[in-house]
Structures are given as C-alpha cells and as structure tokens.
Amino acid sequence: MNRLLARFARSGRDRGTIALYTVLFTPIVLLLAGLLVDGGLAIHARQRAADMAEQAARAGANQIDTDELRRTGEPVLDPGRARAAACDLLTAYREEVTASQCDADEEEVAVTVQITVRPQLLGILPGFSEFQMTSGATARPVTGGPDPGGIEP
C-alpha cells in the first residue's frame, strides 16, 4: 500500500489540486461570510429603526390635551405637541437617523424612521453600496383601565 501511495505521489497527478480548490472556494466563502455579517447588520438596523420609531410614537402619545380629557373623559392628543415630542426624541439619534417623519392627529401619532446601513464585507463588490432600512410605528393615548391603580374600591 505504501508503494502505491509513493508511486502516486511521484507521478505528480495531484499537484495543484489544493490551489484549484482554494481559488474556487475562497470567493464563495467570502460571499457567504458577507451575507452573514451584512445580513445581520441589516436585521439589526431594521430593529433599531423600529425601536426608535416606537419610542418616538410613545413620547408623542403622552401629549394628551388635559382640558379635553377633563371635559369628556376621553384621551385626545394635542397634535402639535405630540408631533413635536416625537420629533424631539428622534433628535437624540441624529447620528443614526438618515430621515424621519412624524405625523399626529387627535387620535394617534405615526412615526417613520430611516437608517443607512453600510455593508462591511459585501461593500467591496460593485452594486453593494449602502442601503436604507425603514421602519414605522403608531401609538394612541390610553388612560386608566379596568383597574388603574390595582386597588379595589
């Protein structure tokens, strides 16, 4: 058996096989690693944009018109204050947010946030430049509930 292996090694028929595999599989491995890394960045950016939009919408939904609440017992938003509160919260994320939109009426606050993602590995390929991830959220004011304080009357 050893003679056969020695003769096969001397014949030179396997020379360059490893180099061929390396040349063929290296781009595939790099592409898969790029999809893994940059795909994770994209998922994280979308979750981050959703988190920012939800926080801003909640901040806006806290801007209840207290006079209207006292008069009718129903929570009604002050649209100007709600829009301003939502947009003010997003200014804290100035470095991350590419674009944002805050809308409010008397019933709800809607916020849309856009974040730019710069690929780490796939960015070296033509056509894989930075891209945008957008997410939105809405919030409505809610007061009390069936048992607001947890104390039975």
Image (cartoon, rainbow, N blue to C red):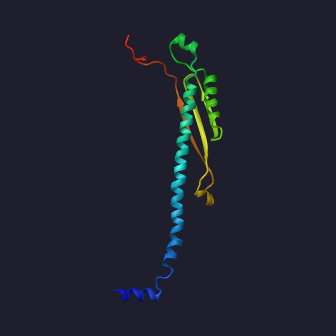
Q: Total label count?
A: 0
In percent of width and height, residue 53 lies at 56, 35
In percent of width and height, residue 28 lies at 51, 65
Query: Residue 119, relative to residue 24: is it above or below?
Result: above
In percent of width and height, residue 126 lies at 63, 60
- The N terminus: image quadrant: bottom left
Residue beneath the point at 52% across and 18% down: 75
Q: Left of 22 or right of it: where is 148?
A: left
In percent of width and height, residue 26 lies at 53, 67
Residue beneath the point at 56% across and 19% down: 64
Residue beneath the point at 46% across and 18% down: 144
Query: Residue 130, relative to residue 30: is it above or below?
Result: above
Q: Left of 13 or right of it: where is 108?
A: right
Query: Residue 16, relative to residue 114: is it above or below?
Result: below
Q: Quadrant of residue 88?
A: top right
- The C terminus: image quadrant: top left
Query: Residue 48, relative to residue 78: is it above or below?
Result: below
Q: Quadrant of residue 93?
A: top right
Q: Nearer the viewer, residue 106 or 32?
A: 32
Residue at the far front: name it.
2
Q: Nearer the viewer, residue 6 or 43?
A: 6
